[in-house]
Image: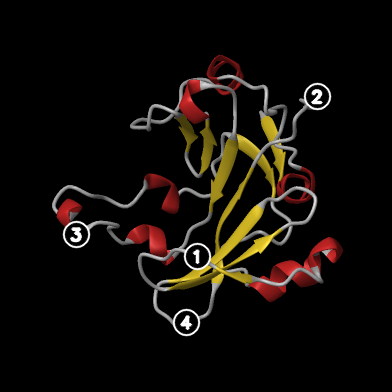
Amino acid sequence: MIHIDLIDFVLRGIIGSFSAQSTRDHILGSLGPADSPSYPDHVVYGNLCFDLMNGGPLALVQILFPHEIYSHCPHQEWETTWHPPRWLTAWPDDRFSWELGPFVPAATVLDVTRAITELQKVEPEKSLWRAYGDGVTLIVPGSDVMIDFDALRAGDVLTLSRITGSPQSVACVDPN
């Protein structure tokens, strides 16, 4: 079982034994068949998405958290066929050993920054693009990982929705 420490990912880009050199074959060989359906350049396991830009090596990792923004259809024309993702009710994905730290559903910016010393002076930035609702992003110095906090409706409490970042450039050995 792959161990994922979210604080290590946020601060250092460490995501299990995966790195910026990891290929689709390496990911599938380590984790088994991905969930279906999936975009061609994505390898998805529940709330964890490995993004292989243009079929190349691993470029981006996205970790999604149960949040109301994911339970609403993103496009009006999809309303008759769209369903919320299955991982919303089965989180975190039990195919991994998770060390969550302060990164739990409903965590606020203050919850996260109080828990991680390195983030205490990071100022949230207003999200540049929103289909609806409101949001801010913490961009972590050193790793450039982005921690998104969203609300479905403007003015609501912003809570953790996603962590996105590039993996480290060199693979580390998973001790498990």
What residue does disc 1 label? 128
In the image, residue 171 sits, relative to residue 71, either above or below, namely above
45 and 132: which is toward the camera: 132
Residue at point 51% right, 50% down?
A: 91
Q: Which is in the foreground here, disc 3 or disc 4?
A: 3
Which label's residue is closer to the chain start, 3 or 4? 3
The residue type indicated by label 1 comes to: Leu
Quadrant hosting residue 14:
top right
Q: Disc 1 versus disc 4: distance between alpha carbons?
A: 18 Å
Residue 1: x %, y % from top left: 66, 28
Residue occupying image coordinates x 78% and y 50%: 11
Please tell me which of labels 1 and 4 falls first in the chain: 1
Q: Nearer the viewer, mark 3 or mark 1?
A: 1
Q: Which residue is mark 4?
A: 156
The earlier-in-sequence mark between 3 and 2 is 3
Residue drawn at x 70%, y 36% is 15
Taking the view exactly as shown, the residue that stands out farthest to the front is: 128
Query: Is the Cβ of the residue at disc 1 closer than 8 Å to that at disc 4?
Result: no
Name the residue carrying label 3: 76
Real-space CA distance between mark 3 and mark 1, rounded to the nearest whole angstrom: 22 Å
Query: Which residue is identified by label 2?
Result: 173
Secondary element under disc 3, as helix, strand or loop, is helix
The answer to which of marks 4 and 2 sits earlier in the sequence is 4
Answer left or right for 31 relative to 13: left
Determine which quarter of the picture holds residue 70.
bottom left
Residue ranking furthest to the right: 117
